[in-house]
Image: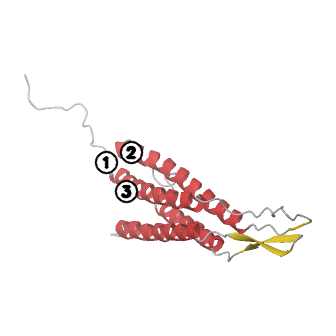
Amino acid sequence: MSSVLLLLLVFVFDLIAFGLAVVAEQRRTTWQVSRESKDLSYCVYDEDIATGLGISSFLILLASQLLIMVVSRCLCCGRALTPSGSRSCAIVLFITTWVFFFIAEVCLLAGSVRNAYHTRYRVYFGGNTAPSCRSLRKGVFGAGAAFIVLTGIVSDLYYVSLSRAKDFEVPRDPGIRMTSNSM
């Protein structure tokens, strides 16, 4: 029963992180060039909501990954697993979940940092020259959201596979049997 609750809790964390990343993609900072006079123009940025959403998604995904790794003892700690197909599958899924997690976290963190960066200079003496207003490229938070989904799926599969590998018992080989039948 605790396994079902854990998987449900991890699913809810991943769903919240995914939702925040999608909203962050939709609410990326945008800008406009404003002209005070003929020779003075500067960048005006709108509200910076996406940075907070991206960091929140980052932290919730981190909590989800830490929860599943602490409960499963990160595959490295605890008793050794008996050789089986479930153990091999758990090892592959363990590596895959960390790769997907790392990519998702990099996308979310880099997107949040880049979204928070605003150019703060003005352009003088440039009647035709507009300032270089920088903003986050489209799709960074979206890529993070996609990898959040992949991380959630693979981490749940990892936990189920690891649970099966821990419950697996090798049948005992009785070896040579001595019988009372004489020939």
| Residue at screen point 23% across, 30% down | 176
Mark number displayed over residue 160: 3
**In-front residue for pair 159/61:** 61
Between 66 and 73, the residue placed more toward the observer is 66
**Gap in Å between the C-alphas at discs 2 and 3?**
16 Å
Residue 119 located left or right of residue 1: right
Q: Quadrant of the N terminus?
A: bottom left
Q: Quadrant of residue 171?
A: top left
Q: Which one is in front, 48 or 44? A: 44
Q: CA distance from mark 2 to mark 1?
A: 7 Å
Question: Is there CB contact under 8 Å for labels 2 and 1?
Answer: yes
User: What is the three-letter code of the residue carrying label 3?
Assistant: Val
Percent x, y of residue 123: 87, 66
* Residue drawn at the location 11% of the way across and 32% of the way down: 180
Residue that extends furthest to the right in the rendered view of this protein: 125
Does dot 2 land on a helix, a strand or a loop? loop
Q: Is residue 54 above or below residue 162?
A: below
Which residue in the structure is indicated by mark 2?
A: 82
Q: Position of residue 112 (x, y in %)?
A: 66, 66
At a point 81% along the width and 74% down the height, the residue shown is 35
Q: Earlier in the sequence, mark 2 or mark 3?
A: 2
SS for callout 1: loop
